[in-house]
Amino acid sequence: MPFRLVTTYSFDSLFVMSAKIVNLPLPLSSGQNRAPSQIAFNRQELSQILSVYGRMVSAGHWKDYAMDFLSDKAVFSIYRKASEHALYRIEKIPALRNRQGQFSVIAPGGLILKRGHELAAVLKVFDKKKFQLR
């Protein structure tokens, strides 16, 4: 197993720097492809989600959010209050990319409000006034 030298800085009363060898996984070469161990939103997707979230927070409809990055999906959960169940969930499931689309908006009861291949199109479900809270 390959090793990398990782330098850790520890300061004691004498300001001594120490280094130790730690077993870290090396990146795979280009010929070896494997699925990521954790699914996440990329920067552009997160920007689109936070734009909608910010608009709804400023309108007073939403108060809190949580992000979960699991082995099979990434979830952005939206809350009206921090102590209750998620009001909506925005999920990214790459396994559905070639089928129904990897993005979906899910209501509290598990009802899928919108599913698609493009996140911007899926997030338009929040532009409709019938999904806003009063």
Image: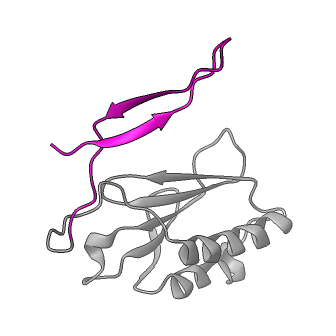
Counting from the top left corner in percent of width and height, residue 13 is at 68, 11
Residue 99, picture quadrant = bottom left
Residue 9 sits in quarter: top right
x and y, in percent, of residue 23 in the image: 28, 37
Residue 129 in which image quadrant: bottom right
Q: 7 or 104: nearer the eye?
A: 7
Colour basis: one colour
Magenta segment: 1-29
In the image, residue 29 above or below residue 102:
above
Magenta stretch: residue 23 in it?
Answer: yes
Dominant SS in magenta: loop
Quick one: 102 or 107, which is closer to the camera? Answer: 102
Above or below, 18 against 84 in this view is above
Q: Is residue 56 left or right of residue 33?
A: right
Q: In the rendered structure, does residue 43 fall within the stretch colored magenta? A: no
67 to 17, vertically: above or below: below
Q: Residue at x 48, y 67 (%)?
A: 41
Q: Is residue 37 left or right of residue 88?
A: left
| Quarter occupied by the N terminus | top left
Picture residue at 19% right of the left edge, 64% below the top? 34
Residue at point 72%, 46% (across, down): 81
Where does the C terminus fall, quadrant-wise?
bottom right
Q: Is residue 95 left or right of residue 103?
A: left
